[in-house]
Protein backbone atom coordinates (compact mmCIF):
# COMPACT_ATOMS: atom_id res chain seq x y z
CA UNK A 1 0.00 0.00 0.00
CA UNK A 2 1.26 3.50 -0.82
CA UNK A 3 2.38 5.53 2.19
CA UNK A 4 0.73 8.59 0.67
CA UNK A 5 -2.83 7.85 -0.30
CA UNK A 6 -3.30 11.35 -1.61
CA UNK A 7 -1.11 11.13 -4.72
CA UNK A 8 -1.32 9.47 -8.12
CA UNK A 9 0.33 6.24 -6.92
CA UNK A 10 -2.83 5.17 -5.15
CA UNK A 11 -4.30 4.29 -8.51
CA UNK A 12 -1.36 2.01 -9.22
CA UNK A 13 -1.76 0.16 -5.93
CA UNK A 14 -5.53 -0.24 -5.87
CA UNK A 15 -6.42 -3.92 -6.41
CA UNK A 16 -9.85 -4.07 -4.85
CA UNK A 17 -12.78 -1.88 -3.99
CA UNK A 18 -12.01 -1.89 -0.26
CA UNK A 19 -9.13 0.58 -0.56
CA UNK A 20 -11.21 2.95 -2.68
CA UNK A 21 -13.98 2.68 -0.10
CA UNK A 22 -11.52 3.47 2.69
CA UNK A 23 -10.29 6.63 0.97
CA UNK A 24 -13.84 7.62 0.06
CA UNK A 25 -15.00 7.21 3.65
CA UNK A 26 -12.02 8.99 5.17
CA UNK A 27 -12.36 12.02 2.90
CA UNK A 28 -16.11 12.07 3.54
CA UNK A 29 -15.64 12.10 7.32
CA UNK A 30 -13.05 14.89 7.07
CA UNK A 31 -15.43 16.91 4.92
CA UNK A 32 -17.78 17.26 7.92
CA UNK A 33 -15.03 18.57 10.20
CA UNK A 34 -13.42 20.91 7.67
CA UNK A 35 -16.48 22.26 5.90
CA UNK A 36 -15.79 25.82 7.09
CA UNK A 37 -12.29 25.76 5.54
CA UNK A 38 -13.79 25.76 2.07
CA UNK A 39 -16.61 28.30 2.37
CA UNK A 40 -14.61 31.18 0.88
CA UNK A 41 -13.30 29.32 -2.21
CA UNK A 42 -14.45 30.99 -5.41
CA UNK A 43 -12.20 29.49 -8.09
CA UNK A 44 -10.77 26.13 -9.05
CA UNK A 45 -7.48 26.14 -10.97
CA UNK A 46 -6.01 23.23 -12.90
CA UNK A 47 -2.91 22.72 -15.01
CA UNK A 48 -3.26 21.32 -18.51
CA UNK A 49 -0.42 20.19 -20.76
CA UNK A 50 2.47 17.86 -20.14
CA UNK A 51 4.68 16.21 -17.56
CA UNK A 52 8.19 17.49 -16.93
CA UNK A 53 7.23 21.02 -17.89
CA UNK A 54 8.05 22.62 -14.53
CA UNK A 55 4.51 22.48 -13.18
CA UNK A 56 5.64 21.25 -9.73
CA UNK A 57 7.83 24.34 -9.54
CA UNK A 58 5.07 26.77 -10.54
CA UNK A 59 2.32 25.12 -8.50
CA UNK A 60 4.59 25.15 -5.43
CA UNK A 61 5.02 28.89 -5.84
CA UNK A 62 1.25 29.28 -6.06
CA UNK A 63 0.71 27.02 -3.03
CA UNK A 64 2.91 29.43 -1.04
CA UNK A 65 0.27 32.16 -1.46
CA UNK A 66 -1.70 32.74 1.76
CA UNK A 67 -5.05 32.11 0.04
CA UNK A 68 -4.18 29.35 -2.47
CA UNK A 69 -3.98 25.60 -1.89
CA UNK A 70 -2.50 23.49 -4.68
CA UNK A 71 -2.14 19.72 -4.81
CA UNK A 72 0.89 18.11 -6.41
CA UNK A 73 0.30 15.20 -8.81
CA UNK A 74 -3.24 14.58 -7.55
CA UNK A 75 -5.38 13.10 -10.36
CA UNK A 76 -8.55 15.00 -9.53
CA UNK A 77 -10.43 14.00 -12.68
CA UNK A 78 -10.02 10.37 -11.67
CA UNK A 79 -11.67 11.09 -8.33
CA UNK A 80 -14.48 12.90 -10.14
CA UNK A 81 -14.91 9.79 -12.31
CA UNK A 82 -15.19 7.58 -9.22
CA UNK A 83 -17.85 9.84 -7.73
CA UNK A 84 -16.13 11.82 -4.98
CA UNK A 85 -18.00 14.99 -4.09
CA UNK A 86 -16.84 18.59 -3.85
CA UNK A 87 -15.79 18.58 -0.21
CA UNK A 88 -14.08 15.20 -0.51
CA UNK A 89 -11.97 16.47 -3.41
CA UNK A 90 -11.10 19.67 -1.55
CA UNK A 91 -10.00 17.61 1.46
CA UNK A 92 -7.81 15.43 -0.74
CA UNK A 93 -6.18 18.55 -2.20
CA UNK A 94 -5.56 20.06 1.24
CA UNK A 95 -4.10 16.79 2.56
CA UNK A 96 -1.89 16.40 -0.51
CA UNK A 97 -0.51 19.92 -0.11
CA UNK A 98 0.21 19.35 3.58
CA UNK A 99 1.89 15.98 3.07
CA UNK A 100 4.01 17.17 0.14
CA UNK A 101 5.18 20.13 2.22
CA UNK A 102 6.01 17.98 5.22
CA UNK A 103 8.02 15.69 2.92
CA UNK A 104 10.19 18.65 1.88
CA UNK A 105 8.63 19.53 -1.49
CA UNK A 106 11.48 17.83 -3.32
CA UNK A 107 11.26 16.45 -6.85
CA UNK A 108 14.14 14.85 -8.75
CA UNK A 109 16.79 16.55 -6.66
CA UNK A 110 15.19 20.00 -6.55
CA UNK A 111 13.52 21.57 -3.53
CA UNK A 112 10.54 23.82 -4.10
CA UNK A 113 10.15 25.00 -0.53
CA UNK A 114 9.31 28.69 -0.12
CA UNK A 115 10.27 29.63 3.40
CA UNK A 116 8.18 32.00 5.52
CA UNK A 117 5.10 31.49 3.34
CA UNK A 118 2.01 29.26 3.31
CA UNK A 119 2.81 26.00 1.55
CA UNK A 120 0.73 23.16 2.98
CA UNK A 121 -1.53 25.55 4.88
CA UNK A 122 -3.43 28.82 4.43
CA UNK A 123 -4.05 32.13 6.16
CA UNK A 124 -7.62 32.18 7.50
CA UNK A 125 -9.34 31.70 4.12
CA UNK A 126 -8.79 29.57 1.02
CA UNK A 127 -9.94 31.50 -2.03
CA UNK A 128 -8.41 29.38 -4.81
CA UNK A 129 -7.85 25.63 -4.81
CA UNK A 130 -6.49 23.38 -7.53
CA UNK A 131 -4.23 20.65 -8.88
CA UNK A 132 -1.25 20.46 -11.22
CA UNK A 133 -1.78 17.03 -12.78
CA UNK A 134 -1.30 18.44 -16.29
CA UNK A 135 -0.49 15.39 -18.40
CA UNK A 136 -2.98 13.09 -16.71
CA UNK A 137 -5.67 15.75 -17.09
CA UNK A 138 -4.88 16.24 -20.77
CA UNK A 139 -4.96 12.50 -21.45
CA UNK A 140 -8.25 12.06 -19.62
CA UNK A 141 -9.82 14.89 -21.61
CA UNK A 142 -8.77 13.37 -24.93
CA UNK A 143 -12.05 12.41 -26.54
CA UNK A 144 -13.83 13.17 -23.25
CA UNK A 145 -14.12 16.96 -23.16
CA UNK A 146 -17.46 16.52 -21.43
CA UNK A 147 -15.41 15.75 -18.30
CA UNK A 148 -14.88 19.51 -17.91
CA UNK A 149 -18.61 19.99 -17.43
CA UNK A 150 -18.71 17.08 -15.03
CA UNK A 151 -15.87 18.64 -13.01
CA UNK A 152 -17.73 21.96 -12.98
CA UNK A 153 -20.92 20.24 -11.84
CA UNK A 154 -19.03 18.47 -9.05
CA UNK A 155 -17.16 21.43 -7.58
CA UNK A 156 -19.60 24.20 -8.51
CA UNK A 157 -16.90 26.78 -9.19
CA UNK A 158 -15.50 28.77 -12.07
CA UNK A 159 -12.56 26.78 -13.49
CA UNK A 160 -9.32 28.51 -14.43
CA UNK A 161 -6.67 26.76 -16.54
CA UNK A 162 -2.89 27.19 -16.58
CA UNK A 163 -1.07 25.96 -19.67
CA UNK A 164 2.60 25.82 -18.70
CA UNK A 165 4.74 25.51 -21.83
CA UNK A 166 8.37 24.49 -22.08
CA UNK A 167 10.78 24.20 -24.98
CA UNK A 168 9.65 20.92 -26.64
CA UNK A 169 13.21 19.63 -26.79
CA UNK A 170 13.50 19.90 -23.00
CA UNK A 171 10.04 18.44 -22.41
CA UNK A 172 10.67 15.50 -24.72
CA UNK A 173 14.14 14.91 -23.28
CA UNK A 174 12.72 14.71 -19.76
CA UNK A 175 10.06 12.32 -20.98
CA UNK A 176 12.68 10.12 -22.62
CA UNK A 177 14.76 10.00 -19.44
CA UNK A 178 11.79 9.18 -17.22
CA UNK A 179 10.05 6.82 -19.66
CA UNK A 180 13.26 5.32 -21.07
CA UNK A 181 12.27 1.81 -20.05
CA UNK A 182 9.12 2.13 -22.17
CA UNK A 183 9.63 4.75 -24.89
CA UNK A 184 12.65 5.77 -26.93
CA UNK A 185 13.32 9.38 -27.94
CA UNK A 186 11.44 9.17 -31.24
CA UNK A 187 8.41 7.62 -29.55
CA UNK A 188 8.47 10.40 -26.95
CA UNK A 189 8.37 12.95 -29.77
CA UNK A 190 5.15 11.50 -31.16
CA UNK A 191 3.73 11.11 -27.65
CA UNK A 192 4.47 14.75 -26.79
CA UNK A 193 2.96 16.15 -29.97
CA UNK A 194 -0.09 13.98 -29.44
CA UNK A 195 -0.56 15.87 -26.18
CA UNK A 196 -0.09 19.16 -28.05
CA UNK A 197 -2.83 18.23 -30.51
CA UNK A 198 -5.14 17.39 -27.61
CA UNK A 199 -4.29 20.76 -26.10
CA UNK A 200 -5.49 22.46 -29.27
CA UNK A 201 -8.89 20.76 -28.91
CA UNK A 202 -9.10 21.71 -25.23
CA UNK A 203 -8.32 25.33 -26.03
CA UNK A 204 -11.16 25.33 -28.55
CA UNK A 205 -13.77 24.61 -25.88
CA UNK A 206 -12.63 26.79 -22.97
CA UNK A 207 -13.08 30.54 -22.68
CA UNK A 208 -9.86 32.40 -23.43
CA UNK A 209 -10.49 34.53 -20.33
CA UNK A 210 -10.17 31.37 -18.24
CA UNK A 211 -6.81 30.33 -19.74
CA UNK A 212 -3.39 31.58 -18.68
CA UNK A 213 -0.58 30.46 -20.97
CA UNK A 214 2.96 30.93 -19.74
CA UNK A 215 6.36 29.73 -20.88
CA UNK A 216 8.79 28.20 -18.41
CA UNK A 217 11.69 30.35 -19.60
CA UNK A 218 9.57 33.52 -19.26
CA UNK A 219 8.76 32.65 -15.64
CA UNK A 220 12.43 32.02 -14.85
CA UNK A 221 13.50 35.27 -16.54
CA UNK A 222 10.89 37.41 -14.78
CA UNK A 223 9.26 35.47 -11.93
CA UNK A 224 7.91 38.45 -10.02
CA UNK A 225 6.05 39.85 -13.03
CA UNK A 226 4.46 36.55 -14.03
CA UNK A 227 3.55 35.46 -10.52
CA UNK A 228 1.80 38.76 -9.96
CA UNK A 229 -0.06 38.34 -13.26
CA UNK A 230 -1.13 34.76 -12.45
CA UNK A 231 -2.44 35.91 -9.08
CA UNK A 232 -4.43 38.66 -10.80
CA UNK A 233 -5.76 36.05 -13.24
CA UNK A 234 -6.97 34.11 -10.19
CA UNK A 235 -8.55 37.23 -8.68
CA UNK A 236 -5.96 37.69 -5.94
CA UNK A 237 -3.38 40.24 -4.90
CA UNK A 238 0.24 39.15 -4.57
CA UNK A 239 1.79 40.49 -1.33
CA UNK A 240 5.33 41.85 -1.64
CA UNK A 241 6.75 39.42 0.92
CA UNK A 242 5.17 36.52 -0.98
CA UNK A 243 6.72 37.67 -4.27
CA UNK A 244 10.11 38.26 -2.62
CA UNK A 245 10.22 34.82 -1.01
CA UNK A 246 9.05 33.05 -4.17
CA UNK A 247 11.51 34.77 -6.48
CA UNK A 248 14.34 33.90 -4.10
CA UNK A 249 14.11 30.19 -5.03
CA UNK A 250 13.81 30.60 -8.81
CA UNK A 251 16.68 29.26 -10.89
CA UNK A 252 19.04 31.86 -12.34
CA UNK A 253 18.70 30.29 -15.80
CA UNK A 254 16.22 27.81 -17.32
CA UNK A 255 17.32 24.19 -17.03
CA UNK A 256 17.98 22.77 -20.52
CA UNK A 257 17.66 19.01 -20.27
CA UNK A 258 17.92 18.60 -24.06
CA UNK A 259 21.71 18.46 -23.61
CA UNK A 260 21.39 15.39 -21.39
CA UNK A 261 20.01 13.32 -24.27
CA UNK A 262 21.63 12.31 -27.54
CA UNK A 263 19.64 14.06 -30.28
CA UNK A 264 20.32 13.10 -33.90
CA UNK A 265 19.88 15.72 -36.59
CA UNK A 266 17.00 13.74 -38.09
CA UNK A 267 15.08 13.85 -34.82
CA UNK A 268 15.86 17.54 -34.34
CA UNK A 269 14.46 18.22 -37.81
CA UNK A 270 11.38 16.12 -37.02
CA UNK A 271 10.62 18.23 -33.94
CA UNK A 272 11.22 21.49 -35.83
CA UNK A 273 8.71 20.40 -38.48
CA UNK A 274 6.11 19.48 -35.88
CA UNK A 275 6.59 22.76 -33.98
CA UNK A 276 5.45 24.62 -37.11
CA UNK A 277 2.00 23.00 -36.80
CA UNK A 278 1.42 24.00 -33.15
CA UNK A 279 0.74 27.72 -32.76
CA UNK A 280 1.61 27.97 -29.06
CA UNK A 281 5.09 26.53 -29.72
CA UNK A 282 6.07 29.24 -32.20
CA UNK A 283 9.68 30.37 -31.86
CA UNK A 284 11.05 27.31 -30.10
CA UNK A 285 14.13 25.65 -31.61
CA UNK A 286 16.78 23.23 -30.44
CA UNK A 287 19.33 26.04 -30.07
CA UNK A 288 17.28 28.63 -28.18
Image (cartoon, rainbow, N blue to C red):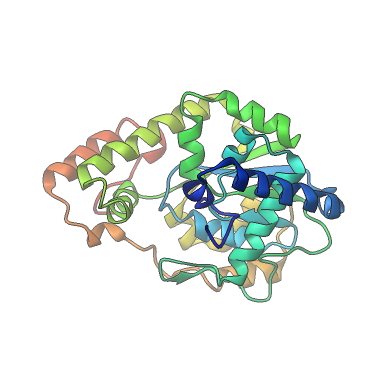
Q: Closest to the observer: 284 or 102?
A: 102
> Percent from the top left, x then y, of residue 59?
57, 56
Image quadrant holding the C terminus, namely bottom left
Residue 171's place in the image compared with 200, above or below, is below
Q: Nearer the viewer, residue 96 or 1?
A: 1
Q: Quadrant of residue 159?
A: top right
- The residue at the point 69 percent across, 39 percent down is 84
Q: Which residue of the protein is positioned furthest toward the bottom in this rendering?
A: 116
Can I make out residue 214 in this image?
Answer: yes
Q: Return the residue nearer the eye: 176 or 5.
A: 5
In the displayed structure, would residue 94 be above or below residue 144? below
Q: Position of residue 11 (x, y in %)?
A: 51, 46
For the question of whether residue 235 can be seen, the reply is: no
Give the side of residue 9 with respect to residue 173, left or right. right
Q: Residue at x 54, y 68 (%)?
A: 105
Task: Identify which residue is drawn at 79% across, 50% down.
Answer: 29
Nearer-the-camera pick, 83 or 60: 83
Query: Can you tell which quarter of the image residue 283 is in?
Result: top left
Residue 140, given in percent of the width and then of the height, sits at 49, 33
Percent of width and height locating residue 129 = 70, 49
Name the residue at the left extreme.
265
User: Does residue 212 appear to the left or right of 26 in the view shown?
Assistant: left
Q: Which residue is depicted at the point 42% across and 56% down?
A: 217
Count the marks: 0
Above or below, 24 against 102 in this view is above
Amino acid sequence: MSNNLYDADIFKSIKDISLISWLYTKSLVKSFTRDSHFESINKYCMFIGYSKSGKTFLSSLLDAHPHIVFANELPVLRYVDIGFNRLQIFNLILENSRIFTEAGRSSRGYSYQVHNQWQGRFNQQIKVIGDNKGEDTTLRLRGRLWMLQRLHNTIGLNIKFIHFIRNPFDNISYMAMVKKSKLNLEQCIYYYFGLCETMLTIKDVIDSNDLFEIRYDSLVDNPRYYLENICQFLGLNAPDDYLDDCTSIVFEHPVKSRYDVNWSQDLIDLVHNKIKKISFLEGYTYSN
